Image (tube, rainbow, N blue to C red):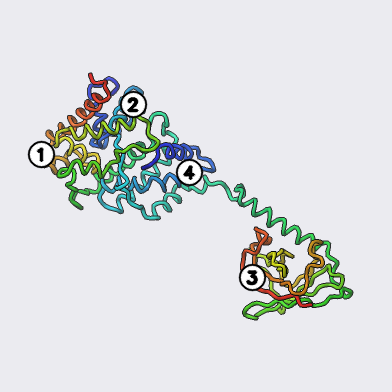
Amino acid sequence: MLDDKTIKGLLLRSAARDEGSAVAFERLYKMSAPLLLGVAKRIVQRAELAEEVLHDSFVKIWDAADSFDPLATQPVAWMVAIVRNRAIDTRSCHDVSRVQSYHDDALEDPDGTLDRLFEWAEGADDLEDRRRAADWLRECLTRLQGVERQSLVLAYVQGLSHSELAAHLEKPLGTVKSWVRRGMANLRQCVETCMGIAR
Amino acid sequence: MRLENHRLLDALCGEYIIGTLRGGARRRFERAMRSEPRAALRLRYWESIVSPRYSKMIEAQPSPRVWQRLQRELDLARYRMPWHRRAAFWQGWAVAATAALVFTLAMLFLPRPSETLQTVQIARLSGTDGAISVTADLSRDGRTLVLHASRPVLAGPKQSYELWLIPVAGTGPVPVAVLGSLDATFALATAQLGQLRPGSTLAVSTEPAGGSPTGKPTGAVILAGKITG
């Protein structure tokens, strides 16, 4: 598991644009590229496209490193968001859906899929509340209605758009849109209840 | 459109995180997050709730080409410590420079070889292939060593030859001189006067320019011979 503290240090050092920046950026790449490539591959489905996404994302990470706010954002999540957005854009220009059919894991074995794709155990450096937040999220995902959970996992992990989801799940666009929206709202509400701040 | 108090702010945050907010809508949302701090705070709150960490099991190794291309396109060489600022370089340089200085001084203060320098051959150094041999002659006062190669051999621009004395006692090679040519005449260091004894070995290794950076042979030993007389 990538250690947020190390990644944060390397990002800040890269942003400094001094004599240590290239070495820090290289370490950042070596540490995080395999995970980020895995994220990209699940969305664009093709190895050469995923490497293109990885390249473009690291150009962005290098350029935007100085706007990364270490107090506000978790660094690994920040990098993952850059890769996912880039991969989603790439996917939409390459009509990936015709190249390879989606994995159906999320439909047939939602719990197994959640555990294969995500790491729920706490990291050594985790604060207590982050560990609990991960537990709650895992718990709340399994409590969602099946269709909501499937929509969220497919959209998040494979980068499917509303219309791709609709085609894949063979449901009207409006229905799928409301599953996604309701799924996210329910997820938030469930986690908030766990946190004890629900309305 | 200001998002801070918009009734759809939560829905948009959710769509943004899950990835279904696309194209122009996503870019407008990102712009709003940069210009509206309260809306950005709401997105952070969402991120603190929904930020699953990917498992190691999804990892894949990128080909080395990706990093090579990044290095080139971002011109990362600009952000590396220049070679002349690195500590390792200066440590190596200090040793090499000292060796070179000793060599230069030896050449400067050397009594010019002349007809009057009486020498006696103490060793013949040869390589494994026998292509070249070097005789080592010691002056009668034991202070000057003269090397004669069977044919002229000059060190390349990035290398030096270094002559070593390997005493019988087995204390390991002791540096004698750094050479640019296998034909050389030089004064022995005070510590080495009287050390070139029969049974000891003289050897020549190839080293980086300026001599061995470590004080021990680091390159190939190209010539060696026992001191006989």
Left or right: B76 in relation to B24 = right
Amino acid, disc 3:
Val
At label 4, counting other C-alpha atoms closer than 10 Å, the crowd grade (few under 14, some 14-19, many 20 or more) is many
Q: What separation in Å lies between label 4 and label 3 (alpha carbons)?
A: 40 Å
Mark 4: secondary structure: helix
Q: Nearer the viewer, residue A126 or B218?
A: A126
Question: Where in the figure is residue A27, as x and y percent of width and height?
Answer: 45, 46
Mark 2: secondary structure: helix
At label 3, counting other C-alpha atoms closer than 10 Å, the crowd grade (few under 14, some 14-19, many 20 or more) is some
At label 1, counting other C-alpha atoms closer than 10 Å, the crowd grade (few under 14, some 14-19, many 20 or more) is few
Q: Are marks 2 and 1 on the same chain?
A: no
Q: Are marks 4 and 3 on the same chain?
A: no
What residue is pinned by disc 1? Answer: A171
Comparing labels 1 and 4, the label whose residue is closer to the camera: 4
Question: Where in the figure is residue A146, as x and y percent of width and height?
Answer: 14, 36
Amino acid, disc 2:
Ala
At label 2, counting other C-alpha atoms closer than 10 Å, the crowd grade (few under 14, some 14-19, many 20 or more) is many
Q: What separation in Å lies between label 1 and label 4 (alpha carbons)?
A: 48 Å
What residue is pinned by disc 4? Answer: A24
Give the residue at x 25% y 27%.
A191
Give the residue at x 25% y 29%.
B12
Chain at numbered mark 3: B
What residue is pinned by disc 3? Answer: B221
First in residue order: circle 2 vs circle 3: 2
Mark 1: secondary structure: loop
Amino acid, disc 1:
Lys
